[in-house]
């Protein structure tokens, strides 16, 4: 019992001292005035030099947003957000319009380096990473640079910031933006439509296998600033892309808002693999500060035999509200959701997925592993539905929770809905605890309490870690240990 | 050498006393057997030596080669040479047996200030050890003890002991759940580890095990004390007469 108490103590201490990415970068910034109104929406659009259609789209979204209410159904509690008490645009001044890496403020390059994301292509190649990864680096409200653009262009792949895409590829953006997550989908998504500032755009042409991993690294640096990113990925017929998203933010006493929208479109025989390692600042030991993460991620398996797979490792944020989903529209399409959600301290996680079976012979698989420690609350919320026409829809859901200590909570909220008698949904759920007997057994073999906890937790999440691209699996494993331990890592 | 003097132990919350002034010395290279009725405190003794938290030591000391074990954490005791083969080995889902063995071995080496083993070196040792105990290779890839039969779990305990090379191996009813062939294999595994420096504390209910692992000394435990000590023939006597004498004696 003492062993468990000690572990729980260590786990409690994690946060501030353990959050390695809490530093800030001092930069001169270009900011919108504080607050949220139509002028701010116009300000953002003007800063981006957007065409009129984009501004109209934003203004329409903003007017609709004002009529909407914040959703209350999630198992998360926080004081009412004053949306006027925040900045909606902040960009490093020196970074007005960098063309190449040499134009990027060295302080920003340094920041990414410190975060373990080298942006210089030669550094990337010289590094330990075995395969190439192209990076779009988003700093507060702007994309500062996108690497390997030229090389990707040769393969016909478009990888750029969404701001550039709006200017350079308006026909694609017009066709697909808002086609997966409608403007009025939900409160936060609608807000995002009005004030999104940057994010990534990916287009993989027909029959193309993207020659390298693509990734976006989001960094919130400015105080009191919300980050509203927008990502759109389109995989044409028979194409394939693997995309990874990472996020961190400095330690701040105030809560900061992050409300992203990610839309994926997979056409016939295309496959998109989307992985996230989310490590926003979670708040301190008393639950002060941390990011409010309200995210709408959805993939549309629009074509026959298409496949979308979401893998997420969630360790950060004070509040996580996030349900990466798949609309299985094409016949024989497949959706996957693999998730590890770690909560500690006072973190609150309400996360899960939706698998919406519309086409025939569609299959989906959900593997969710929740780990709760400290005083955190961790909820899995998952919806699986089969439409009337979704003959032979199949879903398998496995949802496991692991509790560390006595003061945390784990909750599972599945919603199953089938309108087609041939649909088969399987649901398995377990809740377990790291037992003091298991810990003692490991320690008798020579492992310290922290090593033992890390080993047991890694065993618990193994199935999901295996889904991550190799380079990131190791990173994620370390991150999970750091999130849970006082002294490991 | 393991020396236990006047050991008094209660359950952590103080509600029940289990060991009542236990004395026991095991010399280097000695195999000591402990027999005794259910609930007499045999497993408790093994847990207290290994450092389990559920118990409170009220008095007495435990020294391993002169070092005070009671001041050490369980993992420090392991690195100092204490190994406990559990009566009921625990399952660790998702952690491949091989991974666990490597983590344990390297943690102990680190604890003793030694270098980690190289992977080929480690693999060689595991393979050789597993073969001797009749443990198939694919079992080493499975989650530790997950879905293992009772007998397989016990063999795995002995494999761990062989790899970790402790100075005292405590076997808590390792024979229970073993079929006759497995009993022989496991006993051979233990005998192969016997050496002039390594001692064993073998807890068992059955004289049969002691035909294979022949003890130097046999101790009878009752109500948290060693109430009689003798040679290997004492086990035969117990088998014939049971514990009736000791239970009443200790109570008197
Ligand atoms: N953690 C505990 N909490 C409560 N009671 C305990 C605890 N550990 C041991 N006991 C009690 O102490 C006594 C001794 O138990 P122990 O397991 O040491 O006996 P044993 O000699 O190993 O028995 P067996 O031969 O059945 O394995 C028993 O009455 C047992 O119920
Ligand atoms: Mg026992």
Image (cartoon, rainbow, N blue to C red):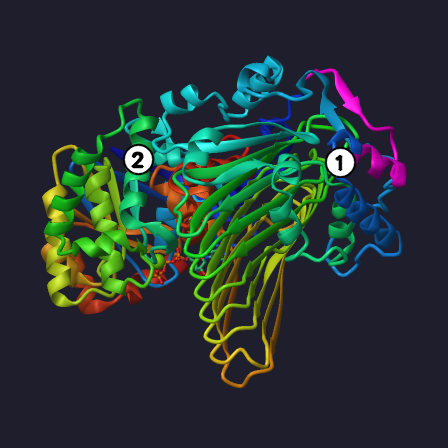
Picture coordinates of residue B173, whole percent (x, y)? 27, 58
| Quadrant position of ligand 1 | bottom left
Picture coordinates of residue A327, whole percent (x, y)? 57, 64
Magenta span contains residue A404: no
Decide: marks 1, 2 in contact (CB < 8 A)? Answer: no
Q: Residue furthest toward the bottom?
A: A421
Instruction: Say which of marks 1 and 2 sits in front.
Output: 1
Q: Is mark 1 within 8 Å of ligand 1?
A: no
Res B99 quadrant in image: top left
Q: Which residue bears the numbered disc 1?
A: A226
Magenta stretch, residue numbers: A25-45
Residue B92 lies left or right of residue A170; in this view the side is left
Placement of A333 over or under A259, stated as above or below: below
Give the CA distance from mark 1 to mark 2. Answer: 65 Å
Specify the subunit that label 2 lies on: B
Q: Which labelled disc corresponds to residue B3?
A: 2
Task: Identify the residue at horizontal 66%, vertical 22% (top origin).
Answer: A97
Classify mark 1: helix, strand or loop.
loop
Residue B69 lies left or right of residue B131; in this view the side is right
Task: Identify the residue at horizontal 42%, vertical 41% (top origin).
Answer: A473
The answer, for residue A223, to whether it is visible in the render is: yes
In this view, the residue in front, B188 or B232, is B188
Specify the subunit that label 1 lies on: A
Q: Is mark 2 within 8 Å of ligand 1?
A: no
In this view, the residue in front, B242 or A44, is A44
Classify mark 2: helix, strand or loop.
strand
The answer, for residue B18, to whether it is visible in the render is: no
Placement of A287 over or under A97, stated as above or below: below
Residue B234 lies left or right of residue A39; in this view the side is left
């Amino acid at each position: 019992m003492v062993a468990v108490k000690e572990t729980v103590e260590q786990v409690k201490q994690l946060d501030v001292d353990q959050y390695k990415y809490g530093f800030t970068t001092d930069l001169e910034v270009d900011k919108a005035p504080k607050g949220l109104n139509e002028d701010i929406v116009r300000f953002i659009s003007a800063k981006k030099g957007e065409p009129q259609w984009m501004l109209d789209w934003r203004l329409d979204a903003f007017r609709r947003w004002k009529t909407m209410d914040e959703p209350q159904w999630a198992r998360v509690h926080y004081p009412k957000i004053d949306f006027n008490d925040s900045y909606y645009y902040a960009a490093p001044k020196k970074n007005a319009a960098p063309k190449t890496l040499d134009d990027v403020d060295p302080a920003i390059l340094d920041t990414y380096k410190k975060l373990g994301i080298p942006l210089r292509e030669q550094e990337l190649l010289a590094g330990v990473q075995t395969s190439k990864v192209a990076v779009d680096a988003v700093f507060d409200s702007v994309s500062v640079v996108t690497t390997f653009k030229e090389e990707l262009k040769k393969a016909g792949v478009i990888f750029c910031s969404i701001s550039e895409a709006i200017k350079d590829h308006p026909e694609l953006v017009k066709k697909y933006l808002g086609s997966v997550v409608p403007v009025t989908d939900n409160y936060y998504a609608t807000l995002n439509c009005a004030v999104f500032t940057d994010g990534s755009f990916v287009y993989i042409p027909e029959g193309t296998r993207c020659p390298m991993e693509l990734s976006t690294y989001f960094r919130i640096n400015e105080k009191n600033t919300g980050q509203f990113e927008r990502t759109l990925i389109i995989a044409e017929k028979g194409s394939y892309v693997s995309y990874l998203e990472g996020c961190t933010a400095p330690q701040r006493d105030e809560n900061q808002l992050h409300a992203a929208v990610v839309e994926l479109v997979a056409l016939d025989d295309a496959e998109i693999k989307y992985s996230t390692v989310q490590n926003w600042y979670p708040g301190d030991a008393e639950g002060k500060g941390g990011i409010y993460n309200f995210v709408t991620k959805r993939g549309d398996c629009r074509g026959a035999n298409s496949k979308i797979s979401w893998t997420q490792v969630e360790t950060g944020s004070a509040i996580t509200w996030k349900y990466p989903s798949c609309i299985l529209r094409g016949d024989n399409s497949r959706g996957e959701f693999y998730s590890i959600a770690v909560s500690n301290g006072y973190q609150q996680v309400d996360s899960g997925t939706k698998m919406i079976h519309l086409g025939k012979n569609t299959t989906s698989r959900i593997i969710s592993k929740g780990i709760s420690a400290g005083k955190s609350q961790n909820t899995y919320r998952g919806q699986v539905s089969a439409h009337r026409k979704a003959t032979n829809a199949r879903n398998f859901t496995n949802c496991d929770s692991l509790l560390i200590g006595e003061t945390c909570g784990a909750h599972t909220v599945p919603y199953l809905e089938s309108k087609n008698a041939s649909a088969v949904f399987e649901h398995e759920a377990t809740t377990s605890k790291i037992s003091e007997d298991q810990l003692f057994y490991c320690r008798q073999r020579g492992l310290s309490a922290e090593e033992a906890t890390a080993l047991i937790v890694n065993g618990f999440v193994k199935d999901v870690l295996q889904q991550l691209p190799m380079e990131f699996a190791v990173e994620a494993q370390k991150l999970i240990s750091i999130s849970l331990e006082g002294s490991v890592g | 050498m393991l020396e236990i003097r006047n050991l008094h132990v209660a359950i952590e919350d103080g509600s029940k006393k289990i060991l009542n002034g236990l004395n026991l010395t095991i010399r280097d290279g000695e195999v000591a057997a402990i027999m005794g009725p259910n609930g007499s405190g045999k497993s408790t003794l093994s847990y207290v030596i290994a450092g389990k938290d559920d118990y409170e030591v009220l008095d007495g000391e435990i020294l391993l080669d002169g070092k005070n074990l009671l001041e050490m954490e369980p993992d420090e005791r392991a690195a100092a040479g204490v190994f406990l083969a559990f009566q009921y080995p625990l399952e660790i889902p998702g952690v491949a047996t091989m991974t666990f063995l490597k983590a344990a071995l390297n943690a102990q080496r680190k604890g003793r200030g030694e270098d980690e083993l190289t992977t080929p070196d480690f693999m060689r040792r595991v393979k050789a050890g597993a073969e001797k105990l009749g443990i198939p290779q694919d079992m080493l890839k499975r989650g530790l003890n997950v879905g293992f039969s009772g007998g397989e779990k016990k063999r795995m305990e002995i494999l761990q002991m062989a790899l970790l090379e402790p100075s005292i191996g405590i076997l808590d009813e390792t024979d229970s759940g073993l079929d006759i062939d497995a009993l022989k294999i496991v006993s051979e595994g233990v005998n192969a580890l016997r050496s002039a420096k390594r001692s064993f504390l073998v807890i068992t209910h059955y004289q049969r095990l002691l035909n294979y692992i022949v003890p130097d000394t046999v101790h009878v435990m009752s109500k948290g004390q060693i109430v009689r000590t003798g040679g290997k023939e004492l086990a035969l006597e117990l088998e014939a007469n049971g514990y009736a004498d000791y239970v009443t004696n200790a109570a008197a």
